[in-house]
Image (spheres, grey):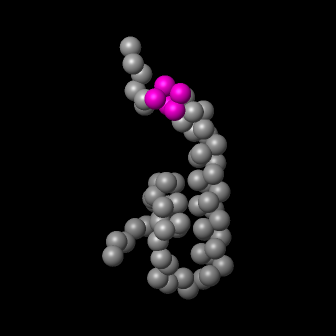
Amino acid sequence: MDLLDLRSASTVMRMQVISTGECLAAPNEAARREFEMYVYSDYARLNEERREILNHVRTRGSVYAVT
């Protein structure tokens, strides 16, 4: 079992945990759902912001610039 403070984790790490992990305890179910919605929203915003960069990488076929 791994322990992680999701409040200080990166956006991608949060999304991975929320989408594939198992919640062991949630004393406040409403707060848990609100946090999960925030994580999904934050991840969607990140993907929108980096869409152009990822498309450019796909077009070039590499992350690194070839000179």
The image quadrant of residue 26 is: bottom right
Above or below 50: residue 7: below
The residue depicted at 34 percent of the width and 71 percent of the height is 2
The quadrant the C terminus occupies is: top left
**Left or right: 4 in relation to 52:** left
Furthest residue to the top?
67
The quadrant the N terminus occupies is: bottom left
**Measured from the top left, where is residue 53 in percent x and y?**
55, 32
In the rendered image, residue 60 lying in the magenta stretch gets the answer yes
Above or below 61: residue 6: below
**Left or right: 30 in relation to 14:** right
**Measured from the top left, where is residue 42 in percent x and y?**
61, 54
**Measured from the top left, where is residue 5 in percent x and y?**
43, 67
The image quadrant of residue 63 is: top left
**Left or right: 27 in relation to 10:** right
Residue 53 can be seen in this image = no
Above or below 33: residue 64: above
| Magenta-tinted stretch | 57-61
The residue depicted at 59 percent of the width and 75 percent of the height is 32
**Measured from the top left, where is residue 60 in percent x and y?**
49, 25
The residue depicted at 47 percent of the width and 76 percent of the height is 22
**Left or right: 28 in relation to 65:** right
Residue 15 can be seen in this image = yes
Above or below 49: residue 34: below
In the rendered image, residue 14 lying in the magenta stretch gets the answer no
